[in-house]
Image (spheres, helix red, strand yellow):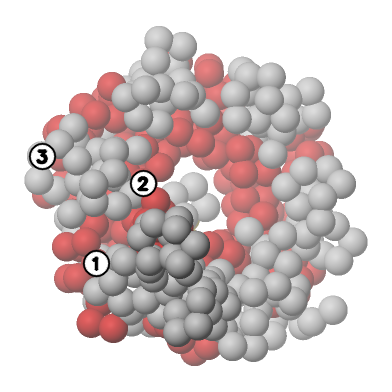
Amino acid sequence: MADARAAVLVDRHIGFISKHQPREHAGVLWAGPGLSAVRPTESKGGHGSGCPSTAQGSPSATTGDRPDDGDTLVHWVVDSIFVSGLFWGLNTETLLGRSVIDKQWAVERILACRCGDGGFAASPGHDAHVLYTYSAVQALALCGVDLGGIANVGGLVLWLVSLQAADGSFGCDEFGDADSRFTYAAMATLRLLCRVDAVDSATAAAYILRCRTVDGGFGARPGAEAHAGQTFCSVAALALCGHLAAVATDSLLLMWLSERQNADGGVNGRPGKRTDACYAWWVGATAAIVGRPDLIDGLRLQASLLQHQSPKGGIAAHIGDRPDLFHTHFGIAALGVLGHPDVARLDPILCLPTTVIGRIASSH
């Protein structure tokens, strides 16, 4: 087992983030380093010009080449998570005390994802979605934008209000599809905008409590299986709604969280599953929110996470796998909430550095 206080590979992780930024900031394509630019070409097999080809002369799908425009396979693979990818990159560099992403460029790209109904889309041309709206607002906060000064911020608040159903749940967009993640994302965005008062927090909390499972965790919706990611979203949502006391001392929840730690020191998302780096955040942050960080062995978890670091930068889901930005971000965030000295402290509910949260609070 590695030393829990061993160094985080800060410079290499920053380099990993930088590699995901194409030249001249043409766009950010947050794919893993093994996925390259495969340009749609005319296929000799008659499949049409829209089919990607890896024939001789075309980039290999495993070379790790960086695309510079949207006419690539990588673009179409990751276009639907662009805003979240930008947030992961911005938050990771901030937590590590560095800055490689141009903030003015980032703000321009984020605002280009704003939709007419008030919300934000994953990428320009997509529909507004509550998860990407949350990522967009988090990213803007990291760029130093005064969130209260966002153009038509009232329209954004009204769009979020429109997502709440009569049972208290939140849908992801105009078509509904309730999920505890969406309630968390909506409430967290409203908290960052200092407008939690705009929705019915009591019924939102009541809906979340109906998502509890018999073993103590929370599922995506009533009757669904408990999952660490959904449990984080549910507990954080309850805190944002002012109803954390309903579960903070619940013995079943506390036991469920403590049972997520595996023999190797890492944590899983469900019983019987292998260790995965991102769950260090979902479980570690939830334990911090309920005021019980002692539910898991934090030093053993840090030691486990450090073994997921790639020598070339980035953090992988599993030891030996290729790193990706998602697991790099949530691995670094977990180290922050666990108190590693190389990572800035952050708010376990909003997943932002405490310095950013303080700046938002002081501006209102």
The Cα–Cα distance between marks 3 and 1, rounded to whole angstroms, is 19 Å
Along the viewing direction, whichever of 52 and 163 lies nearer the viewer:
52
Q: Which residue is mark 3?
A: 152
The Cα–Cα distance between marks 1 and 2, rounded to whole angstroms, is 15 Å
Relative placement, left or right, of 263 versus 221 is right
- N-terminal of the two: label 3 or label 2? 2
Along the viewing direction, whichever of 42 and 60 lies nearer the viewer:
42
- Residue 148 x/y as whole percent: 16, 46
Residue 127 sits above or below residue 135 on the image = above
Q: Which residue is mark 1?
A: 106
From this viewpoint, which residue is outermost toward the right?
263
Give the residue displayed 67% in from the left and 55% down from the top: 279
| Quarter holding residue 245 | top right
Amino acid at pointer 1: Ala
Along the viewing direction, whichever of 117 and 275 lies nearer the viewer:
117
- At label 3, counting other C-alpha atoms closer than 10 Å, the crowd grade (few under 14, some 14-19, many 20 or more) is few
Amino acid at pointer 2: Tyr
Amino acid at pointer 3: Asn
Residue 333 visible somewhere in the drawing: no
Relative placement, left or right, of 85 versus 363 is right
